[in-house]
Amino acid sequence: MKFTKMSLVAALLIGSSAFAIDNVKVSGDAKLYYNTQDNDYSTPATRSNNDLFASQGAAGQAALGLGITADLAKNVSAGVHTTVLTTLGLQGQLVNNVWEGTNGLTDSWIVDEAWVAGTVGKTTGKIGRMKLDTPLVFSETWSIVENTFEAAVVINQDVPDTTLVGAYVGGSNAANAISGNANAVPGVGIANRIQTIASESTFSQFYNGAYAAGVVNNSFKPLTAQAWYYDAPQYVDAFWLQADLAMEGVVAGAQYTKINYNKSNQLAIAKDTDNDVYAFKLGYEMKDVAAISVAYSQTGKETVASLGAGENLATLGNKPMSKLYTEAWWNYGYVTRADTSALNVTVTGKAAGIDLGAYYTQTDADKNGGTVDRADMKEFTVTAGKDFGPLNTTLAYVYTKADDQNQKTAAKDGDAYNAIQAYLTLNF
């Protein structure tokens, strides 16, 4: 749904009486997500009902997102996006858990984007609340709402086939272990700051402010190469290198990243330490038919605090997702653990108008210099999705066998369990 004239909602959100606003667009989506799983145990306590579709092992939630963008002046634009989350009263009946941010009893509302952008020549600047998509700081898309950032970004394309990026990130509504998000709810969603006390902002400081710089080059058209550097003073600094080739159906890629953890009053570790990870991918794509890829990654040893490498710095310490080729479809936080090798096989295709996918990930974690075996994980996921006009529907089945999940006791390797998920998204 798009409007070419100023709507009442746009006027309220943008407050435009002093500007000649053009090209106003209103868009959004309505989502309903559901997950059920039959794991017997929540480490180490037992559950009284482990059946699929029982409320104790199920999560459900609805979300309404509404966004507005407009041109405020020549080469100047602005945008606002809000998200409302609700369980629709399902808690205690069909589900006992939620995907994101709420406590299951109350609704939540957040302004997750509010930005202004301007362009001069081939340079664009953007400031405010926004989504980010860089290798080590990014908005994760798996949940019913995405985590966003308070940031300032500058992008320049004066150099042919090259994009230069500089950014300062000052705030985030995601939860990580070392950015001071005291009111985060561990294990619930990604934008955990949504549910806060009335007097507190949903955004908190991102480390003590962090800086990022990147360069992306495509001079040789089949190859895209990128390099990024990140610095969060008193906490961490990191770099990421990546090259991806796509030529005559063959796809290949290589990634390498290293993170330095800096001992300080803010990061209480025994001493400065670091870790790294490399990953490779090889595959073949038949356009509009099918694609298959195989990927492998290996993290380094880090024996000071068993700290990993390659994870999203925005959610570090909270089962973070990663941009590594080997990342699992659902069980995040395993491929990036210290002294861990990972394998991923992905097959996607289309049949009878249905988008199909099969994803297998396994990790093998060595002892990392210690004497105790560490948790391994295997995941197999199949998905099927189809669009009905503006309505996207996706079903997923997830098989998980992880040593540190579904444990009868804390000392026992976890039993395998199954999950069934349904995603409905109406775009307008």
Image (cartoon, rainbow, N blue to C red):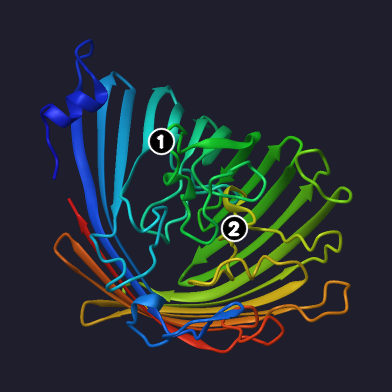
Instruction: Depth check: give the residue in front, 135 or 31.
Output: 31
Front position among marks 1 and 2: 1
Element marked by disc 2:
loop
Q: Residue furthest top?
A: 18
Question: Which residue: 19% across, 15% down?
Answer: 20
Question: Which residue: 74% across, 51% down?
Answer: 259
Location of the N terminus by quadrant is: top left
**How dense is the environment of label 2, judged by Cα within 10 Å: few (below 14), some, or many (20 and up)?**
many
Q: Percent position (x, y) of residue 361?
A: 56, 79
Q: Amino acid at mark 2?
A: Asn
Label 1 – label 2 distance at C-alpha: 24 Å
**How dense is the environment of label 1, judged by Cα within 10 Å: few (below 14), some, or many (20 and up)?**
few
Question: Which residue: 23% across, 60% down?
Answer: 88
Kindly identify which numbered label has been placed on residue 135.
Answer: none
Q: Is residue 289 visible?
A: no
Element marked by disc 1:
loop
Q: Is residue 235 visible?
A: yes
Instruction: Depth check: give the residue in front, 235 or 250.
Output: 235
Is 319 on the left-hand or right-hand side of 99? right
Is 129 on the left-hand or right-hand side of 239? left
Placement of 299 over or under 229, stated as above or below: below
Res 44 → quadrant: bottom right
Lower position in the chain sequence, tag 1 or tag 2: 1
Res 100 → quadrant: bottom left
Placement of 15 over or under 408, stated as above or below: above
Kindly identify which numbered label has been placed on residue 318.
Answer: 2
Residue bearing the label numbered 1: 198
Q: Amino acid at mark 1?
A: Ala
**Number of marks in picture:** 2
